[in-house]
DNA sequence: TACTAAGCTCTTTTT
DNA sequence: GAGCTTAGTA
């Protein structure tokens, strides 16, 4: 088919000058289905932003453009770039994550699905807490039905558009659940779905599932949105899961103006249901598709691009595409070996410090990427000591803090009195004499009588089952009721302030004069400031309601409030969070087998391939310089683990690596050089299989022999010991045996303490 | 019912 | 090293 709007290449508008030929073609194919396969660093975001600018240049109304991304960071980045290109009009483009865009739509259409328009969004903590409660109520084994496990299974089902009814009827699922000894999954799924619905709450997956249901069951609604969005664009299409795929397909069904951009080599979200097939099948779904391949990398040196390719070629499944660059050769990738994570932190801080002056780069030019959020600590410490400013993205953010969640729970409950999870948080915080037993009775009662939670609470005195605390419950209800009357008359900030004061949260935190207490108080004030800013934002009034704020908060889990976005600092984040970003210098740390690739990925080939793609993503973030580092040993759960270097280091073609600092023999993790870390014979050979045999087969030294290991036979009353955490002390008594014995130790600083002795926690001095 | 101390159990990534 | 649970005390 010929699309009428196709512009001949000689009519390239001047603002597209900066793009290369394939980029221009992709941008200018404005009508009809378009697939852009874009290698790492090939200007993918650039093409998307220019494409939007081009659409507007050709007369499209920004309101008609929908642009979907996966992370908030990517959405923000995109919005900024477009604003630079087209100015303030960019604000009118529908742009955001799948979740935020569809939550916004659902907010308007919720009644059609039987939800209140002020529905709550449950984050995974809420979901897990609810599941935990259900498992308990059903008298199931809490060890067997771990909340995260159950939620994972439910999530997987939902992402494949399987609701609890079809789940219960599906022999395959039931078979599998029986096989794994967890036959009750389906029933938990059912209870969970029903409780969420009753609470007027959607979890993350429900936002997508319900959008799909809305479009499927209400064709008039679908039709409206189909015409509303004349142009649909999806970034990181390789990361879409089935429900996201179905929704975009429906939305684009009328105009067929769908443009997807992706790179199969960067698919790193299979764990949440992403399906690479979506990108592989795009051509089948849209036979008229115009496909463009962007293969020239503008970001990185030859060395980096080649090294990354040498890694990814180990994966079996790939689209045909070869990324290349015209950039300089560049430096080899530096590999560092360190004794412990502490040493690793110091090494990386030093490295950054040196490179800053060598390359004349600001802090902003550096990123430290790791596999798991918990790895950030060692680097925070060393950077602080080195006097380098840094910022951590993701992890336990501002909105995850207890005091913030408590306050938000108040607001949530005011907005939606059926929000069971919010109620659980606040009914006895600050303590008002309503204990667990009472709460339990209320929930059970509501379920038995088929009443809304709120109804039971409001007239608690009428239910003798509730017992002695019924009066207090009613009092609590009256307080909430008084807050509720303010919903219509007051803006979000005034309401929040009032709730904070009257609810007693402000007072409780103010009175806590411990250091943590004071910081909690500050955090609460910061939240209130945030609400004030939100209220004063120049949006229309209807956008400033409490439910809208709560939604923003629930879906914006990114980095908390950024007081100073222009601060010059080093970026610390997980590799997942780094997707779409680029930095002159990148340090990939914790390059250890079992950590990266993650231990859990080792058993299946496809999981391992995803880890490898993750490594590929990390490598291709770097523009000029790349460092890989690993620790030979690492502390975990208080004990010392010995680590092997990641297999991924071996997979990089050796010509791209500089191993000179990988062979440095690490010192013993415990000062004084008494240990034997870096066992003899592990000095690296010169070949590309540098680490293979020597280090993997003779990994690390057993623990220092002077440490108490397993049984306590070597420990005696009167001995002086050094405990990892508590320092020096004298053993006063020992009882028990094996690896779980109790001892009373009189510590120099703390006095006598009873300890359960475990491997490697202490040693005889 | 509220608070504290001690003990136990964890391993991943995001919305 | 954190978050949760349990046991014990006020």
Image: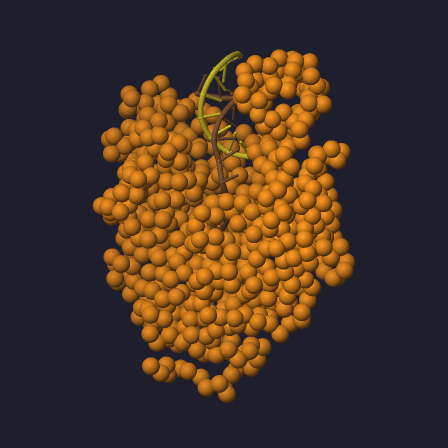
Chain colours: A orange, B brown, C yellow
* Quadrant of image for the C terminus of chain A: top right
Check the image and report above or below for A179 versus A295: above
Front residue of this view, candidates A153 and A635:
A635
Residue A506 placement (x, y as % from top left): 54, 33
- Tell me if A419 is positioned left or right of A217 in this view: right
* Extreme residue toward the bottom, this view: A10
- Residue drawn at point x = 43 percent, y = 50 percent: A604
Check the image and report above or below for A337 versus A307: above
The answer to which image quadrant residue A58 occupies is bottom left
- Residue drawn at point x = 25 percent, y = 30 percent: A448
* Extreme residue toward the left, this view: A169
Tell me if residue A362 can be seen: yes
Tell me if residue A94 can be seen: no
- Residue drawn at point x = 33 percent, y = 64 percent: A249
The answer to which image quadrant residue A568 occupies is bottom right
Front residue of this view, candidates A197 and A282:
A282
Check the image and report above or below for A215 versus A706: below
Residue A20 placement (x, y as % from top left): 55, 78
- Residue drawn at point x = 37 percent, y = 27 percent: A439
* Quadrant of image for the N terminus of chain A: bottom left
Residue A687 placement (x, y as % from top left): 65, 57
Front residue of this view, candidates A342 and A478:
A342
- Tell me if A604 is positioned left or right of A302 in this view: left
Residue A561 placement (x, y as % from top left): 57, 49
């Amino acid at each position: 088919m010929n699309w009428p709007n196709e512009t001949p290449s000689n009519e390239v508008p001047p603002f597209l000058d900066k793009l290369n030929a394939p980029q221009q073609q992709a941008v200018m194919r404005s009508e009809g289905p378009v697939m852009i396969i874009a290698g790492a660093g090939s200007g993918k975001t650039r093409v998307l932003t220019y494409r939007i600018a081009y659409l507007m240049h050709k007369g499209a109304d920004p309101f008609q453009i929908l642009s979907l991304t996966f992370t908030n960071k990517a959405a923000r980045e995109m919005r900024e770039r477009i604003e630079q290109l087209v100015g303030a009009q960019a604000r009118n483009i529908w742009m955001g994550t799948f979740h935020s865009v569809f939550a916004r739509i659902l907010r308007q259409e919720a009644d059609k699905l039987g939800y209140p328009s002020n529905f709550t969004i449950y984050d995974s903590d809420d979901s897990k807490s609810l599941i935990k409660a259900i498992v308990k109520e059903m008298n199931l084994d809490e060890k067997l039905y771990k909340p995260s496990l159950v939620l994972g299974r439910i999530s997987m089902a939902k992402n494949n558009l399987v609701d609890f009814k079809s789940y219960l009827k599906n022999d395959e699922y039931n078979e599998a659940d029986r096989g794994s000894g967890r036959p009750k999954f389906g029933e938990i799924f059912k209870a969970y779905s029903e409780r969420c619905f009753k609470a007027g709450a959607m979890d993350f997956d429900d936002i997508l599932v319900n959008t799909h249901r809305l479009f499927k069951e209400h064709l008039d609604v679908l039709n409206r949105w189909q015409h509303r969005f004349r142009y649909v664009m999806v970034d990181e299409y390789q990361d879409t899961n089935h429900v996201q795929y179905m929704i975009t397909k429906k939305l684009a069904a009328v105009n067929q103006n769908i443009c997807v951009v992706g790179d199969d080599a960067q698919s790193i979200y299979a764990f949440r249901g992403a399906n690479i097939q979506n990108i592989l099948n795009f051509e089948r779904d849209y036979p008229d598709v115009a496909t463009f391949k962007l293969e020239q990398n503008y970001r990185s040196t030859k060395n980096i691009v080649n090294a990354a390719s040498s890694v990814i070629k180990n994966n079996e499944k790939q689209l045909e595409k070869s990324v290349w660059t015209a950039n300089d050769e560049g430096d080899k990738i530096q590999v560092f070996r360190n004794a412990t994570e502490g040493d690793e932190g110091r090494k990386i801080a030093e490295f950054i410090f040196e490179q800053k002056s060598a390359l004349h780069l600001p802090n902003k030019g550096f990123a430290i990427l790791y596999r798991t959020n918990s790895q950030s600590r060692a680097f925070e410490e060393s950077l602080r000591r080195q006097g380098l400013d840094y910022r951590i993205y993701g992890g336990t953010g501002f909105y995850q803090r207890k005091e913030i969640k408590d306050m938000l729970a108040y607001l949530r409950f005011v907005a939606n009195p059926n929000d069971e999870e919010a109620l659980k948080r606040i009914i006895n915080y600050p303590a008002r004499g309503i204990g667990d037993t009472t709460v339990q009775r209320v929930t059970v009662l509501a379920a038995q009588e088929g009443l809304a939670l709120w109804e039971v609470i409001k007239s608690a005195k009428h239910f003798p089952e509730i017992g002695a605390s019924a009066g207090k419950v009613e009092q609590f209800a009256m307080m909430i009721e008084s807050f509720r009357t303010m919903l219509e008359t007051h803006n979000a900030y005034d309401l929040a302030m009032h709730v904070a004061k009257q609810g007693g949260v402000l007072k409780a935190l103010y009175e806590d004069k411990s250091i943590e207490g004071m910081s909690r108080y500050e955090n609460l004030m910061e939240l209130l400031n945030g609400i004030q800013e939100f209220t004063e934002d120049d949006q229309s009034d209807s956008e400033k309601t409490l439910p809208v704020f709560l939604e923003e908060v629930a879906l914006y889990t990114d980095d908390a409030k950024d007081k100073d976005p222009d601060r010059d600092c080093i970026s610390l984040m997980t590799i997942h969070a780094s997707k779409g970003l680029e930095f002159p210098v990148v340090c990939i740390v914790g390059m250890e087998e079992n950590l990266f690739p993650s231990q859990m990925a080792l058993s299946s080939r496809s999981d391992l391939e995803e880890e490898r793609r993750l490594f590929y993503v990390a490598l291709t973030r770097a523009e000029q310089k790349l460092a890989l580092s690993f620790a030979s040993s690492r502390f975990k759960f208080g004990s010392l683990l010995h680590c092997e270097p990641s297999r991924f280091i071996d997979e990089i073609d050796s010509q791209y690596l500089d191993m000179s600092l990988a062979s440095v023999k690490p010192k013993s993790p415990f000062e004084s050089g008494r240990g034997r870390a870096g066992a003899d014979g592990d000095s690296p050979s010169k070949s590309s299989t540098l680490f293979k045999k020597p280090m993997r087969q003779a990994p690390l030294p057993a623990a220092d022999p002077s440490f108490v290991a397993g049984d306590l036979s070597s420990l005696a009353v009167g001995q002086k010991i050094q405990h990892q955490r508590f320092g020096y002390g004298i053993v006063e008594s020992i009882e028990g045996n094996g690896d779980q014995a109790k001892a009373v130790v009189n510590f120099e600083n703390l006095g006598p303490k009873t300890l359960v002795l475990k491997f490697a926690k202490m040693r005889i001095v």
